Amino acid sequence: MAGAPDKPRSARPGTRKVHVKSYGCQMNAYDAQRIADTLVAAGFIETAAPDEADLVILNTCNIREKATEKVYSELGRLRVMKQAAAQEDRAMTVAVAGCVAQAEGAEIVRRAPTVDLVVGSQNYHRLPELLEQARHAPVIDTEFPAEDKFDFLAAPSTAAIRARGVCAFLTVQEGCDKFCTFCVVPYTRGAEVSRPIAKIVAEAEQLARAGVREITLIGQNVNAYHGEGPNGQPWTLGRLLERIAEIPGVARLRYTTSHPRDVDDSLIAAHRDLPALMPQLHLPVQSGSDRILAAMNRKHTRAEYMAVIDRLRAARPDLALTSDFIVGFPGESEQDFRDTLALIEDVGFSTAFSFKYSPRPGTPAADRDGQVPEGEKSERLTRLQRLIEAQQKAFNEGMVGRTLPVLFEKPGRHPGQTMGRSPFLQPVHVTSPSARIGDIADVMITEASGNGLFGTLADEAAVNGRPAPALMEVHKA
């Protein structure tokens, strides 16, 4: 706990308001919801407007330097809001949570004295008591607790689940034991920990009862899942997926993010045998060069990654693959980069996420020789993204004329339009008065863009004299 003189805080009549802003991965989005649920139980209500909030929480990401600097930029804006609130005789508490909090701790309060509370990613369940302490002096809590935070975080209400939509994230695993040399996750999230089967199933059943149709199981290394089953023995992710697929109301399942070394036989079987498991998989590779993969400590080669892809496609031929790529890792040569482009061409991705290497303090790669100049990183990133965009465009255009089952998620941008997602995670826009949120309906794809699809309900197309074709197999672009 950092010291500061006791200071009075003005009380605000009525229910207190909290604004949670989340950065980064799906895990942070899930954590932000659980933070809000816990604070609702403590007497807060959520608000979308930070300037009217009594408590503002930045739930942060530390995976890249730019993500960290965004947090400090946002704290500058909050300083102005906090000063304006004080002029209205109103107290605003500012908290920084998540991976930046875990990584930087007291440095946040030093750089941004407007911050009242710094809380690490494993301590959200302690927020109510930490906020009480922060009324008197800034508080920093980034220790890894002995207790499991999931045992103490408040469950969401049915109304809250429904307000968040028909698709939901569900954390099943946290932390990572892989120690890739570019990554801060093992230091900010800790070692791999898997939640017990019973608790995951109970949460999934609550989501289904509230109308959730699609559940995405998430973890920093989700396919390393090894949670305790009903008989006390560990279950694999494949077996967990089978169990959740049995829950009434759960129509679709996904999972992210995976490591190639943890794709086991039970997961391959799940892709082959479970109709609810969607034919789309995010499987990061980062580089196509064996030399760079070794320097990254990825613990697999290019050939081993390709062998995993072959096994997955043998089990599910229409599987759409996405991945992550880092360009400009220390020591990366032009030939190493070309090896990455060659891997992309060989696999054929439906889309991918790509970034310039960003040194993260405390990671082994940050201080290595051979740092690639920014100009070269930018030029390589442009070339890589051009190839990925071409593959995504070809993949989407390959859907035109096909009929895909679409889960409708929310209203579209235009009147009468509804947006849903295909089994391959593409956004699909349909203009129809009969498209209802939460329904899964066949959509005939009539048009494709670089980022999504457009279509008409298949039964409406048939009424208009255009019979809907059967769903066709999807192959790599």
Image (cartoon, grey):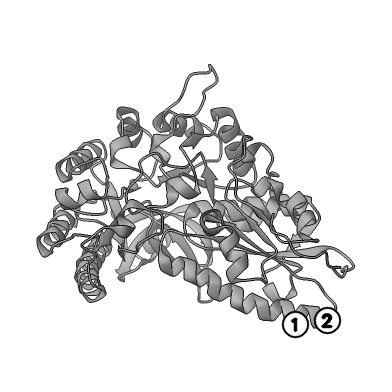
Q: Residue at x 42, y 66 (%)?
A: 65
> In this view of the protein, which residue sits in the foreground, 208 or 328?
328
Q: Position of residue 112 (x, y in %)?
A: 61, 71
Q: Residue at x 34, y 28 (%)?
A: 266
Q: Position of residue 358 (x, y in %)?
A: 34, 64
Residue at the spot of label 1: 84
Q: Quadrant of the N terminus?
A: bottom right
Q: Amino acid at mark 2?
A: Glu
Q: Name the outermost residue toward the top.
A: 231
Q: How many marks?
A: 2
Q: Is residue 439 visible?
A: no
Q: Quadrant of the C terminus?
A: bottom left
Q: Residues within 10 Å of mark 2 (few under 14, many from 20)?
A: few
Q: Is residue 419 above or below residue 83?
A: above
Q: Are marks 2 and 1 in contact (CB under 8 Å)?
A: yes
Cα–Cα span, label 2 and label 1? 7 Å
Q: Is residue 242 above or below residue 57?
A: above
Q: Amino acid at mark 1?
A: Ala
Q: Position of residue 238 (x, y in %)?
A: 39, 31
- Residue 197's image quarter? top right
- Say the numbered circle drawn on residue 88: 2
Q: Is residue 433 above or below residue 122?
A: below
SS assignment at label 2: loop
- Say the numbered circle drawn on residue 112: none
Q: Residue at x 32, y 35 (%)?
A: 262
> In this view of the protein, which residue sits in the foreground, 124 or 361?
361
SS assignment at label 1: helix
Q: Is residue 99 visible?
A: yes
Decide if residue 442 is on the left or right side of residue 408: left
- Residue 136's image quarter? bottom right
Q: Position of residue 107 (x, y in %)?
A: 56, 63
Q: Residues within 10 Å of mark 1 (few under 14, many from 20)?
A: some
